Image (tube, coloured by chain):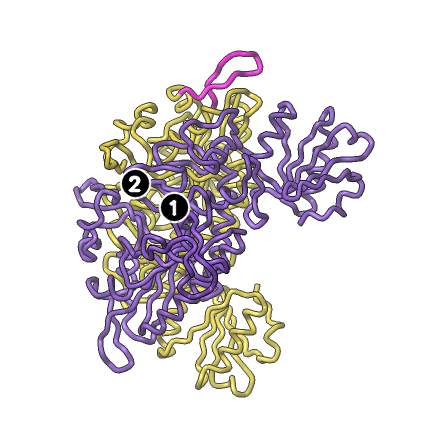
Chain colours: A purple, B yellow
């Protein structure tokens, strides 16, 4: 396993999660807002992606993959080529034809569906992708929070009626809740602005976090929440729905769901013949979720003073074995036993001091840490639950009965 | 499931697999050499990717994900910025800094590793990614065969000695054989030119196919093979290794493995301190495999006259249920039973004629087809094995005893 940890905290990393990702060998920066996900981070990314897939497939969505390169023509059709501004990365091919690198895929998905959705019988339809997106931020910062190349899940739904859109919107909203719950996150759902994407109404999923870039307001029960910029609510006011009083917090936007209506289908001629025989524009919804940003948000909520404990659902490893026995034989044997038990185990076979190994282990953030120390020769190891900080002296012969949960 | 099949064969698709992919609703073209993988194709792609992952992980490789955007500086260091020519897609960011879209990632992987591989103790190392790549082909053609945006697996290995590179090269070669065998492909391994990537020696994995773009030579046992351009072998000559006589064929290049040596590590200063205390350049290998191209190669070998039967390892579905009973109730019940048996089943609930359904089923290419016809009311269905063309009249009550293998 390639985990190139650093001794120093990188100077240009401003927030804890970013510092941990760089110092802990999770990722490597190549240019402003452009990173490689090294094996440790990519293991977490793949687990997040899998949870997203499972919850979306469960409600009847299908996965596809659209291209990053999008031709100018489509963006002219939707009137976004000029409107989008400098955040849209543009390039010309060898024949001087203009393209952009997709920051979002409403144009492409509309182009895909308009050739085949010709009747109400083909609706509803829900298509999503997990894909690399590009946005040329003026000032990329906070690592994966505001990058220029990032991984996003984008889902698009297609409907014959507003009621059907409403129903699907709620189903996706529930799927988002299920996803964020499985990721172990604390979050609020807030009413939001629709911005560049457009459409009638939208909500954001905000991961609560001191370093969040957005101010949000919510009541004590967490049943009402809103983007402060829109609602101008004051801390301590009674919440509009009458439940408790308003609290304020900062949030990281991890998801944004939109009722698009016909914003794209009308200009781009995505029409269908309805049951009444009339031609109508398809009604659309779109639903984003920042996969790479979620990695960072989880890490913000899963670390305390540079000590990380990943939630089990996305942890790169569950158990970390740190051998301090003479030749590492007992440690390696324990590692093999744990692997045979079907657990994801990391074994630190480096020729480093205990201090270096423990510091790195704090950043790698497994829930269980096994120290194979002086008593190993007598048949005992130390198993530490890093979430509760409980430590057990445990007989090696009894390893299979320890409850790694 | 969104499978927008067409009635006509698209005019600009020149080869069978490309025609099937478009007509069968597997993919959609957006610009020359730029496609969306619709749900049917993306299911196959994900299965190919999973097989690749399993075989590479087995030999000790770790997965990471590098960015598509690569800054000019790195390509100047490796001297490829000028050398690469027009196939390299280039762009400027909003601050006028120059980037390219990666066609390959030697520069980035060298930048990642040169900061952390400082000792022979950290070698060997094997890192791979499955990622979208870009190459601005002058004339994109044959669908996914020669596209401008495509999915590739690229693996890079790092070594202290030539002997270690040789050993790893052989291990990866074996993993490639395991992958192509699991994909059910007929192929030959040929000696090849190193081209743009460079290095001392390389081999190509050629999928045998009439529409292949490369002429290759091999003996009857398939144990010797060579790129004809390099070796100028004549059909019927005795093979140099003395086993049988030379045959000629056309191949699709699905994989290419290289002993890079120090081509990138020397100019880019990827060095390590060896056991003898001396600073030396790291010795590298690199190993590509075209994931999207493999989809097409498998399809070329799995269709006959527009009738497809996907190999089970990558089939989007194993069973296709075509209901022709009055209200589809029996058909739907069978579909539910098969799903409960853990099989991947497609159910055709469209209001189309039997002819349309059978034509589409030929393109979707499940190994088993179940026709719920006139005898369904009496408790019997027709199960057809599309690989052997054997048909069985089968009691619905006995469905769980049919051997779907």
> Which span is picked out in magenta?
B269-283
Residue shown at the point (36%, 67%) measured from the top left: A125
Asked whether residue A389 is drawn in magenta, I would say: no
Which residue is the site of mark 1?
A: B151
Residue shown at 42% from the left, 47% from the top: A250
Residue on which disc 2 sits: A137
Residue A109's place in the image compared with B341, above or below, is: above
- Judge from the rendering whether residue A56 lies leftward or rightward of residue A371; answer left or right: left
Where does residue B341 sit, x and y in percent of width and height?
Answer: 59, 68
In front of the other: B122 or A321: A321
Taking the image as drawn, is residue B100 in sight?
yes
- Between circles 2 and 1, the one closer to the viewer is 2
Q: Position of residue B91 (x, y in %)?
A: 24, 37
Q: Position of residue A94 (x, y in %)?
A: 20, 40
Instruction: Please report the residue visible at 59 percent of the width from the left and 42 percent of the height from the top.
Output: A317
The magenta stretch spans residue B278: yes
Say if residue B215 shows up in the picture: no
Q: In the displayed structure, does residue A94 sit left or right of residue A109?
A: left
Q: Circle 1 — which element?
A: strand
């Amino acid at each position: 396993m390639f985990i190139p940890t650093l001794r120093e905290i990188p100077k240009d990393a401003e927030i804890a999660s970013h510092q941990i990702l760089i110092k802990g060998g999770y990722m490597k920066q190549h240019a402003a807002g452009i990173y490689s996900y090294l094996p440790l981070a990519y293991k977490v990314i793949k687990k997040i992606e899998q949870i997203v897939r499972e919850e979306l497939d469960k409600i009847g969505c299908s996965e596809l993959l659209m291209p990053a390169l999008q031709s100018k023509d489509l963006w002219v059709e939707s009137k976004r080529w000029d409107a989008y501004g400098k955040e849209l990365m543009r390039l010309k091919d060898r024949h001087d034809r203009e393209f952009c690198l997709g920051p979002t895929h409403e144009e492409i998905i509309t182009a895909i569906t308009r050739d085949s959705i010709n009747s109400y019988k083909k609706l509803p339809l829900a298509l999503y992708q997990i894909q690399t997106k590009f946005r040329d931020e003026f000032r990329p910062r906070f690592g994966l929070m505001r990058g220029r190349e990032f991984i996003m899940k984008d889902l698009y739904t297609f409907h014959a009626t507003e009621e059907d859109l409403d129903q699907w919107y709620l189903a996706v909203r529930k799927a988002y809740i299920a996803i964020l719950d499985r990721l172990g996150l604390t979050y609020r759902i807030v009413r939001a602005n629709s911005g560049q994407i457009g459409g009638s109404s939208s909500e954001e999923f905000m991961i609560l976090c001191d370093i969040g870039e957005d101010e949000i307001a919510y009541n004590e029960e967490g049943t009402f929440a809103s983007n402060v910029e829109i609602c101008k609510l004051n801390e301590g006011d009674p919440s509009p729905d009458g439940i408790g009083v308003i609290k304020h917090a900062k949030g990281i936007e991890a998801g944004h769901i939109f009722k698009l209506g016909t914003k794209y289908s009308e200009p781009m001629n995505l029409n269908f013949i309805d049951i009444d025989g009339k031609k109508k524009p398809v009604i659309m919804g779109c639903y984003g979720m920042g996969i790479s940003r979620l990695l960072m948000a989880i890490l913000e909520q899963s670390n305390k003073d540079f000590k990380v404990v990943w939630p089990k659902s996305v942890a790169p490893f569950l158990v970390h074995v740190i051998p301090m026995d003479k030749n590492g034989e007992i440690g390696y044997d324990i590692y093999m036993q744990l692997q045979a038990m079907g657990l994801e185990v990391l074994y630190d076979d480096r020729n480093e001091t205990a201090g270096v190994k423990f510091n790195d282990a704090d950043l790698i953030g497994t829930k269980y840490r096994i120290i194979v120390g002086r008593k190993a020769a007598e048949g005992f190891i130390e198993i530490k639950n890093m979430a509760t900080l409980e430590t057990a002296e445990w007989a090696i012969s009894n390893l299979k009965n320890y409850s790694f949960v």
